[in-house]
Amino acid sequence: MKIQFPAKPAIYTENTTVAFQALVDGEALTREVSTEALQDHFGATTAYGSDLVATFEANRAAIEAVAMAKLPQRVDAGRYLLTSADF
């Protein structure tokens, strides 16, 4: 299984998460990280979308490393949310 993370910007979602893209064997899948995970583990100080996206971008490598470890367990096209418990 080949997993890549394109350098596309993350976005704040209506679910109050930050979404980012993963390519799994060439198929684009959207993954999300919760507000709580960004606050608990990466220092986000507010729940404002712009702050959460900035926190994600500043910690992208660490978040993508966890996502890479979790992706083989959940490769389906459905929503996959990384929560505070994943970090």
Image (spheres, grey):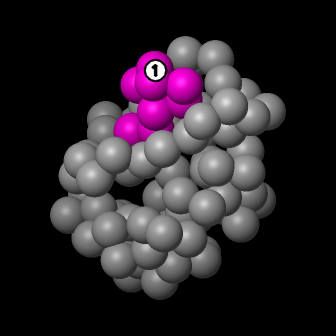
Q: The residue under label 1 is which amino acid type?
A: Glu
Quadrant placement of the C terminus: bottom right
Q: Secondary structure at mark 1?
A: strand
Direction from residue 81 to residue 71 in the image, left or right: right
At 60% from the left edge and 36% from the top edge, which residue is drawn? Answer: 2
Query: What is the count of numbered marks?
Result: 1
- Which residue sits at x=51%, y=51%? 33
Q: Is 14 situated above or below 45? A: above
Quadrant housing residue 41: bottom right
Question: Does 47 lie within the magenta span?
Answer: no
Task: Check the image and report above or below for 68 versus 38.
Answer: above
The residue where tag 1 is placed is 27
Residue 82: x %, y % from top left: 62, 48
- Where is residue 1 shown, x and y percent of the image? 68, 31
**Horizontal relation, residue 70 to residue 13: left or right:** right
What's the residue at 35%, 77% (across, down)? 58
40 to the left or right of 13 = right
Q: Quadrant of residue 25?
A: top right
Q: x, y percentage for residue 43?
A: 47, 83
Would you say residue 71 is visible in this rendering?
A: yes
Q: Is residue 10 above or below residue 31?
A: below
Magenta-tinted stretch: 21-29
